[in-house]
Every structure is written in C-alpha cells, then in structure tokens.
Image (spheres, helix red, strand yellow):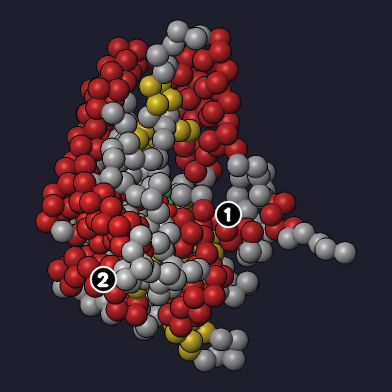
Amino acid sequence: MAYVNENYLKLPGSYLFAEIARRVAAYKEAHPEADIIRLGIGDVTLPLPQASIKAMQKAVEEMGKKETFRGYGPEQGYDFLIDAIIEHNYTSRGLKVEHDEIFVSDGSKSDTGNIQEIFAEDNVVAITDPVYPVYLDTNVMAGRTGKLKDDGHFDGVVYLASNAENNFSPTIPSEHIDMLYLCCPNNPTGTTLSREALTKWVAYAKEHDTVILFDAAYAAYITEPDVPRSIYEIEGARDVAIEFRSFSKTAGFTGTRCGYTVIPKTVTAKTKDGKRQPLNPLWSRRHSTKYNGTAYIVQRGAEAIYTPEGQKEIKEHIAYYMENARIIREGLTKAGLTVYGGVNAPYIWLKTPNNMKSWDFFDKLLKEVSIVGTPGAGFGPCGEGYFRLTAFGDRNDTERAVERIKTKFSV
Ligand code: PLP
C-alpha cells in the first residue's frame, strides 16, 4: 500500500491566478467588446537582450559540431558564468564570494522552494506576510507546519506582518525562529528593507542561530543608492545568510530559466548532537544528486548580460519597466489613492479605497475600467485590503490604464 504525503492535502488549491483567470473569462464572455488591460502578471514582456540571443546562437552552433559539442556540464554551473557573476555582482561591490559558493540553477523558484530540504523537519519557519507564496507552500509540503487555520495562517509558522503601519519592515518577533525568509525587494509590496533593518535581522540571526534565506530576485530594480543589493553588504551576513538571485526579471529569462544561489561556506546550522555543520556541502550534495546542470546554451546567454552590450540592454529594459512603475505610482497618487513600492521594484502596492476587500476591488476594477490586477489577499492574510499592479506591461497600456483609473477613482 502506498500512502500519500498528506502534507500536500493541507494546502488550499492554487487559487489565486486560477480564480483571476476565471473571473476575467466570465467578464469577457459577458462583455466581448471590453478592452481589458492586464497589469496583474508578474512576467516580463520585453524580449531577451540581443547580446544573450547572439551568445545563445553561437552556443547552438557549438552544440552542432563534434569538436565543440557539450554533454552534461558541471552541476554547479560552468566556470565562465560563475566567474562573471562573482565579478559583476559581488567583487565590483567589494563583496567576497568564492567560486564554490555559487550554484547555478534553472531559477529562483526551484531554489527558494528546494532549499528547505537541507533543514530539519522540526525547524520553525518565519515568513513576512504578504510575500511570494513559494516559501510557505514548500514548507507546508515538507511537513514543517501544522494545518491551515480559519484566519488564513498555518499553525506552527511565524508570520511577520508587513504593512503600512510598520512601513513594510516587520518587527523582530518574540518567538524563536530557525529559518527566516526575507524577500527584498519584496513581491508583492514592491518595498525594500533598509540597511538598518537588515543589520538588525543579521544580528538577530547571529544571536538566535537562525539562517536567513534572502531572495534578491528583484535586486536589479533597486534605484536608491542606500538600499543593499545583496545581504552580504551587511557585516556578518556571510555567517548566517543564503542568497538567491535570478536572471528572470533581471534580463528577461523567465521562459529561458537561469538563476543561482549563494551559500557561503561559513553559514552553518546545528546537528542534533550539537555540532556545527556547514550548509554549503549539503546543498552541493543535493544539487548534484537532484539537478543535472543548467543548459550550456542558457548559461552562455546568461553570461552575455555581463558584457558591455548586455549591460546596456538590460539597463534599458529595467528603465522601461521602472518608468511604467513611475507612471502608475504618480498617476494613482494624483487620483488620491495611497500607493507603496514602485521605486526599487516593478510592483505597485496600493491600499484599496474605503478599506474594500482586495477581491471586491479586483471586481470593481475589472467591471468599471476593464483592468486586471492581483488581489493582495492572494499573497498572505496581511495582503487583505491591498492590491498589486505590475510595471511589466506595455507602456501604452500602462498609460491608458492609469488614465482610466484616474477618471473613475479620483477623489
Ligand atoms: N522570487 C520572487 C520573489 C519572485 O517574485 C519570483 C517570480 O516571480 C521568483 C523568485 C522566481 O523566479 P525564477 O523565474 O528565477 O524562478
């Protein structure tokens, strides 16, 4: 008799985007003439940089010749990409990261989801709320939580409320936590944690023997000089933090798939008999056992974003999205709405007018101005009363959407 992993049964269905699609389809059927503008997606819309395309075309040619063909590559990633990552993202900012501390992967969703495997099942997990749902769901699957309660929280998880009242910078909890997920810049709020806040978290982690799992998937969108691009800018973080980075939003690799995880050899956790165990060799073992390397062609494409041509292109793309963010942020503010984010991230997080429930605001926006966004409640109980718009859309659509909202909702 095979038994199922009943932890999966604790998870509610993948409700958010399915429900959005259902409501949009129903509206479209009732109003076939509606000119719907979608500002709900968290996916890029600009094509890959030409520098990456050229590098991948060359790599395809190499794969077609016996002399240059490559089969299985190193599981951790090719040297050429690891060297480029270290030089451009760490050495250039005065940060030390060693070659065998980088693990190239097929993206941060897999890495942030899989990392929990190297931790004990009875560790206490903390997540900020609202946040990217993968951290919580993968810990539920692994049995590190109790059941879902009526208030939308899972038993046994420490939720760190992140809202306008605390300026989206959660306070340090009184209960002990073992694994702390931080997402900075944050999806969905588009807000960041200050250097001071991160310094406090690193100090907390050192004092309480906590490992910080720092998701910096949107680091490339940070515009303010004082916001750390990497957790390793904080002194002591090399002892307590693992960092996740992705080429998805940085360079349009959402469909091409490439990311990496940094695990300094100095980050350790305890064994039950009290010994200190570095996490790097555990992840190395896991990665080489369960992952067979990111495609050579893709790694060449990723490497090319670090060339002068690639850097110029990705900066232009990010600037395009961030101009959309500015248009949304300023337009909505002019309309009298309260908005957050959109300065160091491509997400605008708005307070629903009159404390409307986020799904009610979703319906109102869809029915009254044919705009699709994402209800904040879909990212955690503290997202209730908020709404996410993304800056990844087309410029013209973004401008039209803002005009519609201004016309309809101006107070
Ligand atoms: N981390 C955050 C915070 C995200 O918002 C996303 C994607 O939306 C990811 C990770 C996943 O990135 P990737 O495409 O590298 O899997």
Q: Residues within 10 Å of mark 1 (few under 14, many from 20)?
A: some
* Residue 202 rendering spot, x and y as whole percentages: 34, 71
Residue at x 41%, y 63% (from the top left corner): 294
**Residue situated furthest front in the rendering:** 66
Q: Residues within 10 Å of mark 2 (few under 14, many from 20)?
A: few
Earlier residue among tags 1 and 2: 2
Nearer to us in this view, 33 or 165: 33
Instruction: Identify which amino acid the numbered label 2 is placed on.
Output: Phe
Nearer to us in this view, 64 or 404: 64
**Label number found at residue 80:** 2
Q: Quadrant of the N terminus?
A: bottom right
* Residue 217 rendering spot, x and y as whole percentages: 35, 55
Q: Which residue is mark 1?
A: 137
Q: Is residue 130 left or right of residue 397?
A: right
Q: Is residue 37 above or below residue 388?
A: above
Residue 133 in view, yes or no:
yes
**Residue situated furthest right in the rendering:** 1
Instruction: Identify which amino acid the numbered label 1 is placed on.
Output: Asp
Q: Secondary structure at mark 2?
A: helix
Q: Secondary structure at mark 1?
A: helix
Q: Quadrant of the C terminus?
A: top left
